[in-house]
Image: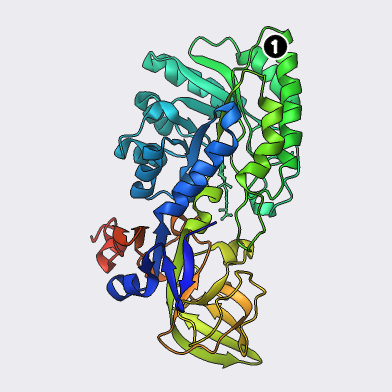
Amino acid sequence: MDLFSYRDGDVFCEGVRLADIVEQVGTPVYVYSAGTIRHHYRAIIEAFEAVKPLICFSIKSLSNLQILRLLADEGSGFDVVSGGEVARVLAIGADPGRVVFAGVGKTDREINEAIAAGVGLFNVESEQEFENLSRLAGAAGRTVRAALRVNPDVDPKTHRYTTTGKKETKFGVDIERAERFFETYGRDDNVRLDAIHLHIGSPIYSAQPYVDAINKTLKLMARLSAKGLEIRTLDIGGGFGADYVEGQSPLAVDYARQIVPLLTGTNLDVILEPGRQIVCNAGVLATTVLYVKQGGERNFVIVDAAMTDLIRPALYESEHFVYPARLADGAQPPTRRPDYEAPDGIRVDIVGGVCESSDFLAKDRVLPVMERGDLLTVFSAGAYGAVMSSQYNSRPRAPEVLVEGDQWRLIRRRETYDDLFAAEQDS
Ligand code: LLP
């Protein structure tokens, strides 16, 4: 579900015409729908009601402060993975006690900052990290709380670059080693280790890998309990899918239907770390056609957005639906599927202006005939879009706009050339 739709031939975000935003802000620009973000957040809360989870929105998927503020106002906590993300939580005045801190490579500085901030849960990923956390907490005279990130060795059947819960990834500690881990560190003076964290990959288009991972983890907990090591919290991580293709992803209720029965009656505090499912379809990238040209048999539509704005197609060959923001008179709105073919359309690749042949936004799409100046909408770009953008080729990053009803506001300005070299010494 999202609040982007074609109305009288134009793409609207909630009550605002995309072209009206573009007229003032230019392209490329990311546009987000506040209503869609709230809808998906609430859908997860409702679906998992029976286990009253703490939702920790995964900041890495969309980290703009205004979006974080919106989610904090909804009651969300946050999943962070760096000192910079902790700083974002502090910048919006959200409760650090409702923050979980993951990551295989936390530096001393990041750990010290998180201890000082009062981060609620450190998701520890190795023996050495645990010992370091204990040392730093002791030195700070603080007791902190930790979860062990367990690698349950399940296959989430997602892209190899976003699989994390199989053996031989760098993430977490093998489930076979977890028991020993709790025996060694479960009674530490500085770190209360009484939680388990799972995150098996992203996106995961079925509840089954979660079921497998949770079942393995519950068995581990029973073994630990027999040794007097009680686990109080289970953080099942993120990874719920979203519709890049209409109807592709299970909904929050579909995941919950299989996951909740495993957790009810366990007395565990449950944490979820969704990112993509909340924000993916809450954002689009608007871009303008610069040129059309042919190369051999192929037709290229060259646009002013590029891999620097949305790197997912180049990095994962992921498919985002791309279509004109204005339909020809009388034309029907498209179905949002990458294989959708516009009537009387032509087959094109939609590419950016960066000097890399992997710089494409979409390949082999049948679009209406495009002309210079036409506006295109790249859908499902809210998650891992703006946050993964770069200044490669010295391209200033795109601005971000948030729409609420029939109002919109700039929540990140377009970068300037000065921003490109502001951090560089000129001597
Ligand atoms: N928790 C942890 C520990 C994570 O590593 C992640 C994502 C999440 C939660 C949130 O996962 P989500 O609910 O958003 O699927 N750049 C890739 C995705 C990388 C995901 C990294 N970890 C992409 O564009 O598809």
Location of residue 402 (image quadrant): bottom left
Position of 178 relative to 203 (above/below):
above
- Figure disc tally: 1
Location of residue 29 (image quadrant): bottom left
User: At 61% across and 20% down in the image, what residue appears?
Assistant: 268
Relative to 109, 276 lies left or right: right
Three-letter code for the amino acid on which mark 1 is drawn: Ser
Location of residue 194 (image quadrant): top right
Relative to 369, 251 lies left or right: right
Relative to 365, 408 lies left or right: left
Farthest residue toward the left?
A: 427
- Asked if the beta carbon under badge 1 is closer than 8 A to the nearest atom of ligand 1, the reply is no
Q: Position of residue 82 (x, y in %)?
A: 45, 39
Residue placed most toward the observer, 404 or 306: 404
Q: Secondary structure at mark 1?
A: helix
Farthest residue toward the top?
A: 228
Position of 358 relative to 45 (above/below):
below
Image quadrant where one finds the N terminus:
bottom right
Q: Is residue 308 visible?
A: no
Q: Residues within 10 Å of mark 1 (few under 14, many from 20)?
A: few
Residue placed most toward the observer, 244 or 135: 244
Q: Position of residue 62 (x, y in %)?
A: 45, 51
Residue placed most toward the observer, 195 or 124: 195
**Which residue position is annotated with label 1?**
225
Image quadrant where one finds the C terminus:
bottom left
Q: Position of residue 7 (x, y in %)?
A: 45, 73
Position of 410 relative to 225 (above/below):
below
User: At 71% across and 42% down in the image, what residue appears?
Assistant: 207
Q: Position of residue 347 (x, y in %)?
A: 63, 85
Position of 277 relative to 152 (above/below):
below
Q: Is residue 205 visible?
A: yes
